[in-house]
């Protein structure tokens, strides 16, 4: 790819995931037929498996299908990075045109390693930027899948947007129970309901806080858990129940979310020391980390994001209101002990020597930390 200073900005990519039968293909057909989607390059595993609506196809040339909406669609031929590189080279040569890339995973895929590929491959890291993770979740069969397949739990935990599909096949109470369960696994993800791919497709784009053009409100919303139901809203017990009691299985029970908010900016060396130690001891159990970081001596905050031990480059948020200097960190993973994680950071901030901190990590079992 071109290395000149006049190279275009990195192209945003969206990872579309969801377990087998969740409705990813239905969603793709709806999105590809929507002119408001703009020019998108959609990468699927195989055309034959994708089940694209042939009424939407305008022309076929080489390995790229041109849709009537102006979108492109192509198959993954072996290595994902090479497939995207071919598309970008064709775009640079003026042979095709698109403004974003959508990568559809297989139903059994854990999205974590795919996100790591984008973060570690030199070409992908240079030419693309994460726009968001979208997970399609089947309201009818998805709750049972969560108990059987950890990949389904990971797909939900890593999502910025969860599309609750097939809501027309279940009762309102069942849909409410499914949504409550999704929010328990991923409290910072947005959940929207869809039937036959019908919902506001613009909700799929600009999901991450890593965008330099993101507003202060968008970045805060990216890290802020949704408000929990008011515990005092039914003191009389007379209000009707809107959903049955959700059943949580061991797979989704072991997923926890930890939110840390600090009023004062952090010393960069202190933060690196704390975070490196945390990843060293709990990296394999941390599915995702995202946040807004204020450092001493720097007015502009940074949005950061990582999957397990692999991190995207931090992005300065230049539109920030200087009256708010709070650092916000969100971790989602297996069996994370929020009190222990908060304590480890507090000890460093209070100036405790390193030797007094490490036993808190090294002496903690998987269940404790």
Image: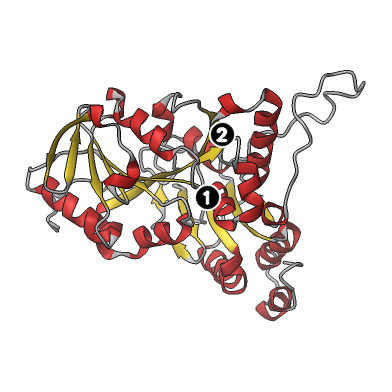
Residue at the location (14% across, 58% down)? 1
**What distance separates the C-alpha of mark 1 from that of mark 2?**
13 Å
Give above or below for 195 relative to 20: above
**Which one is nearer the viewer's eye here, 143 or 276?**
143
Instruction: Identify the mark at residue 155; answer none if there is no mark.
Output: 1
Q: Is residue 243 visible?
A: yes
Q: Is residue 296 left or right of residue 344?
A: left
Which image quarter: residue 208?
Answer: top left
Q: Is residue 274 left or right of residue 40?
A: right
The image position of residue 101, as x and y in percent, is 29, 44
Whole-percent x, y for residue 57 in the image: 20, 31
The residue to which callout 2 is attached is: 191
Q: Position of residue 26 (x, y in %)?
A: 40, 33
Q: Nearer the viewer, residue 3 or 131?
A: 131
> Total number of numbered labels?
2
Q: Residues within 10 Å of mark 2 (few under 14, many from 20)?
A: many
Instruction: Please give the name of the residue rendered at 45% of the width and 43% of the height, measured from the top-left corner.
Output: 209
**Sequence-first tag of 1 and 2:** 1
């Amino acid at each position: 790819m071109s290395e000149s200073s006049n190279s275009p900005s990195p192209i945003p990519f969206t990872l579309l995931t969801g377990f087998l039968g969740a409705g990813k293909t239905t969603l793709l057909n709806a999105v590809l037929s929507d002119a408001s989607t703009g020019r998108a390059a959609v990468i699927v595993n195989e055309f034959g498996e994708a089940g694209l609506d042939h009424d939407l196809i305008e022309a076929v040339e080489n390995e790229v299908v041109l849709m009537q909406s102006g979108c492109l669609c192509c198959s993954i031929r072996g290595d994902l990075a090479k497939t995207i590189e071919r598309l970008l080279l064709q775009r640079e040569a003026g042979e095709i045109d698109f403004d974003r890339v959508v990568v559809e995973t297989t139903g059994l895929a854990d999205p974590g390693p795919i996100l790591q590929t984008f973060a570690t491959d030199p070409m992908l890291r240079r030419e693309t930027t994460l726009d968001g993770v979208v997970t399609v979740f089947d309201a009818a069969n998805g709750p049972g899948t969560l108990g059987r397949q950890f990949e389904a739990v990971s797909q939900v935990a890593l999502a910025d947007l969860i599309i609750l599909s097939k809501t027309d096949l279940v009762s309102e109470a069942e849909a409410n129970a499914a949504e409550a369960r999704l929010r328990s696994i991923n409290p910072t993800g947005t959940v929207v309901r869809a039937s036959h791919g019908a919902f506001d497709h613009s909700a799929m784009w600009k999901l991450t806080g890593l965008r330099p053009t993101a507003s202060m409100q968008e970045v805060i919303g990216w890290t802020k858990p949704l408000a929990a139901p008011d515990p005092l809203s039914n003191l009389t017990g007379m209000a009707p129940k809107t959903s049955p009691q959700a059943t949580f299985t061991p797979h989704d029970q072991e997923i926890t979310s930890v939110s840390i908010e600090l009023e004062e900016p952090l010393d960069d060396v202190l933060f690196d020391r704390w975070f490196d130690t945390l990843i060293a001891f709990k990296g394999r159990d941390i599915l995702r980390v995202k946040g807004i970081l204020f450092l001493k001596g720097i007015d502009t905050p940074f949005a950061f994001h990582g999957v397990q031990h692999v991190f995207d480059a931090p992005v300065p948020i230049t539109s920030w209101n200087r009256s708010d200097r709070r650092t916000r960190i969100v971790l989602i993973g297996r069996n994370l002990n929020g009190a222990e994680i908060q304590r480890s950071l507090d000890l460093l901030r209070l100036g405790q020597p390193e030797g007094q901190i490490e036993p808190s990590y090294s002496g903690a079992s998987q269940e404790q930390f």
